[in-house]
Amino acid sequence: MDENTKTGQELYKEHLERLKKAVANEKTDRPPINLNADAFLVQYGGGKVSDLVNDPEYGNDLIIKALQKLGDVDCGGPGAFPAMGGGAFFFARIKLPGRELPDNMIWQIDELRPMTEQDYDVIIDKGFGYYTEQFMKKYFPETEESKKDMEAMMQLGPKVAQKYIDAGYVTLGVSQEGGTPQPGMMCIAGAPFNSLSAARGTGEFLRDIKKMPDKVLEAMNVMHETNLKTLRDTVRTAKPLTVFTGGGREAGDFLSIKDFEKFAWKYFKEAANVVIEEGSYCYLHLDCSWDRFVKYFLELPKNKMVFGPDGTTNIFKAADVLYGHTAFYGDVHPSMMSLGTPDEVYAYCKKLMDRFADKGFIMSTGCAVPSNAKPENVEAVVAAALGK
Amino acid sequence: MSNKLVEAMADLNEDAVLEEVKALKAKNVPALDIIASLQEGMGIVGKRFEEKEYFLSELIMSAEIFNEASQLLGGMGGAGTASKYGTFVMGTIYDDIHDIGKNIVTTVMSSNGFNVIDLGVDVPTAKYVEAIRQYKPKVIGISCLLTTAFDNIKECIQTLEKEGLRKDVKVLIGGGPVDEATCKYVGADHVCRNAQETVEYSKKYMGVQ
Ligand code: B12
């Protein structure tokens, strides 16, 4: 049967089964394809990036249309509702296309870096939740517009998520077992390192870990305890297939091995273990280069993780260490997606497929498809995975 | 040259650096000589970074100690370091707000003896033009982490050309996705992979040994 004649329900089942096998590091008929590409897809579907802001439901309809146009893609969406939530997560103001920015510009995360040296004590005494709340009150007091945005999201979230399911698309990281994904049940795991780095500003934070390491660790311990508890509760309730387990600011050239172990890995590993203990898989969303840290993932259980670099880590060298231990998530580099040719993209994807041989492999691009990716390059990713 | 100070700086021993600077000052050692020792220490820090013994957090800490020490000497300008190697103008190109890398580069450049003019992020072409006219740098740096902003660098460099400013400045670019192909595409002179390379190239272009 041709994918065009299958119902959304049949497609969903097929895509979910394929993804389940891939994340469990088993063999699949072909690699499942995941596209994290809202800003690109909304344009490919005939709209503007601002459609996701001004009318998220319409924007997501366009994304679904774009996914269908691309061929038998397995996973995608829901597109971000960039107006919401992101600000608190990054301690940032978000400038939006169609509001502060031109229609086809990608939203901008403008970091505010509100945290001071003294705030470590606030976190230690009252918790990071309290600190974040105070931040929101100070920088984002509730307005009519923000209330409207929030209400719209609460209403739209489940509706839009269901549309993806009806069209046959599996969303990585959202509840799969119970059927309907639950908004607010997005599970995110990682080390406190990234939130602190965002709140404080990376330069300041890197200086803090040298100048006042004990204070930083004390704050991290307080945050970590709460994070683990929330993580365990949400994973247990939402039962997502995979949990976004992210890191970036602890990788690259930021830290020595000694500091990496002490300030980042200890926490990262414990968070990953909670995900695994609760029966989900870790989708390791790894920004920046993890070249120096690949071997650490051997300390976590086998066949419970998807190693997802952003195009910066050498995935083939990582495979020398982790093949057979984790599944892999292909990583076409954003520069290649924007500036490369379809032949280059296709050849890179084939090289990935040769290496991972349809076992525990998800085809995708590093982190996210850039909004200015060439359409023929995205088509080349899909064609390679479909064996065309 | 105070070996003790050079070593303390290279080992990022903050207390020892500050103590030694105070001691030297009390002995009436000229500020410029003290700064020279600190910079010798910074040179070793840079080498250790290249040899992967130190990483970015160590680079940032070294700049922090350097700044504290130079404040004891009446600030960098007062100690005469500002003009040592000439001026470096740098910013992140418009539409892009990534600044972690840019800040590391500017911090390391200023603690290595360059007078750094930091234009910030989301910098429009006009601001580069104005800064080049005002400060007459031999080298400028454009940071860019977004492939979607490559065309902006290209436009900026073309404008420098049109304004007759291009021939007198070397343009360094850098940032995650920037590579040789980008360099050619936008018409820059060189891609630097990290802050240490930026120091080396700027020294070369400014004729510093
Ligand atoms: C941290 C980060 C952010 C932070 C930025 C925080 C900040 N204050 O800078 C936040 C979360 C805010 C952010 C936002 C966004 N980001 Co971002 N981000 C990153 C990330 C993970 C790391 C960048 C970083 O800081 N690296 C560490 C520093 C030290 O390295 P560096 O910048 O390369 O700098 C070093 C060298 O390159 C060099 N250097 C740098 N600049 C220069 C300049 C000169 C002249 C010289 C000589 C040398 C030099 O020296 C530095 C020190 O060694 C990268 C992933 C990656 N692999 O790079 C994505 C990445 C750059 N981001 C990306 C995207 C898409 C975005 C957003 C558009 C997301 C969104 N939809 O909102 C926004 C962009 C907003 C905007 N308009 O700019 C993409 C870009 C893809 C593309 N199209 O090119 C990347 C590549 C992630 C990915 N794989 O998809 N991001």
Image (spheres, coloured by chain):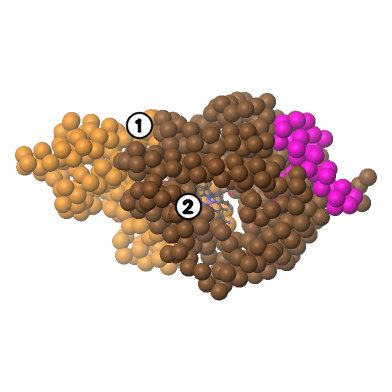
Chain colours: A brown, B orange
Query: Is A14 inside the magenta-drawn segment?
Result: yes
Report the front residue among B141 and A73. A73
Q: Is residue B134 left or right of residue A160?
A: left
Indicate which disc residue A100 carries: none
Q: What residue is shown at x 43% (from left), y 59% (from top)?
A: A134
Residue B110, image x, y percentages? 30, 49
Q: What residue is shown at x 52% (from left), y 59% (from top)?
A: A87
Label tally: 2
Number of the front mark, 1 or 2: 2
For the residues labelled 1 and 2, the Cα–Cα distance comes to: 39 Å
**Residue A185 vertical placement versus A258 (above, below):** below
On the question of residue A30 being in view, the answer is yes
**Quarter of the image that includes the C terminus of chain B:** top left
- Determine whether the residue tagged by mark 2 lies in a helix, strand or loop: helix
Q: Name the residue under label 2.
A: A129
Q: What residue is shown at x 68% (from left), y 69% (from top)?
A: A55
Q: Mark 1 points at which residue?
A: B48
Query: Is A166 inside the magenta-drawn segment?
Result: no
Q: Is residue A53 left or right of residue A384?
A: left
Chain containing the residue with disc 1? B
Q: In which quarter of the image is residue A228?
A: top right
Residue B10, image x, y percentages? 27, 33
Amino acid carrying label 1: it is: Arg
Label 1 crowd (10 A; few <14 / some 14-19 / many >=20): some
Q: What stretch is highlighted in magenta?
A: A6-35
Amino acid carrying label 2: it is: Gly
Q: What residue is shown at x 74% (from left), y 35% (from top)?
A: A22
Chain containing the residue with disc 2? A
**Residue B14 vertical placement versus B140 (above, below):** above
Report the front residue among B184 and B96. B96
